[in-house]
Image (cartoon, rainbow, N blue to C red):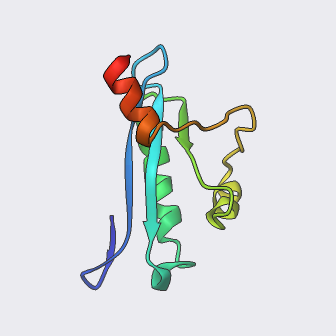
Amino acid sequence: MATCLSRLNAAAEAGETVDGRLRQGIYLEDLYVRDSARGLGVGRALVTRIAQLVVERGGKRLDLSVLTWNPAREVYERLGFDHKSDWTGYRLTGDALKALAEKG
């Protein structure tokens, strides 16, 4: 979290990823920067700290997902993130979720 004068300006939620080996990296689940704090470097500082945690823990990658319309994509690209064009997102919701949960 990043605060300025006791006001929350940014927050990040992340967790370790497991892909065949423990502690391979961290997945950045959510990054929020208040409109008034955008452009001040607080988001970059949070992502930088998470990258430091990956390296400190012997991890090999920092992953995140972002909606195609989100202008934050440009920020992530400036930070050095690569677009994973070989991945496609899937989601199970509603009746299909209930059906799978009930019938397996």
Above or below, comparing residue 21 to residue 69 in the picture: above
Give the total number of marks visible in the rendering: 0
Q: Residue furthest right?
A: 85
Closest to the observer, 98 or 84: 98
Left or right, 72 with reference to 31: right
Placement of 82 over or under 104, stated as above or below: below
Q: Is residue 11 left or right of residue 77?
A: left
> What residue is drawn where x is 66% and y is 67%?
71
**Quadrant holding the N terminus:** bottom left
- Point out the residue furthest to the top here: 20
Q: Residue at x 46, y 33 (%)?
A: 96
Residue shown at the point (41%, 34%) measured from the top left: 97
Above or below for 12 versus 60: below
Q: Residue furthest left?
A: 6
Residue 95 in which image quadrant: top left
Residue 57 makes an appearance in the image: no
User: Residue 101: which quarter of the image?
Assistant: top left
x, y percentage for residue 44? 53, 63
Q: Give the x, y percent position of residue 76.
A: 64, 56
Residue 13 in sight in this render: yes
Residue 94's quadrant in the figure?
A: top left
Q: Position of residue 93 (x, y in %)?
A: 45, 41
In which quadrant of the rendered image does the C terminus lie? top left
* Residue 18 x/y as whole percent: 43, 23
Q: Residue at x 57, y 47 (%)?
A: 65
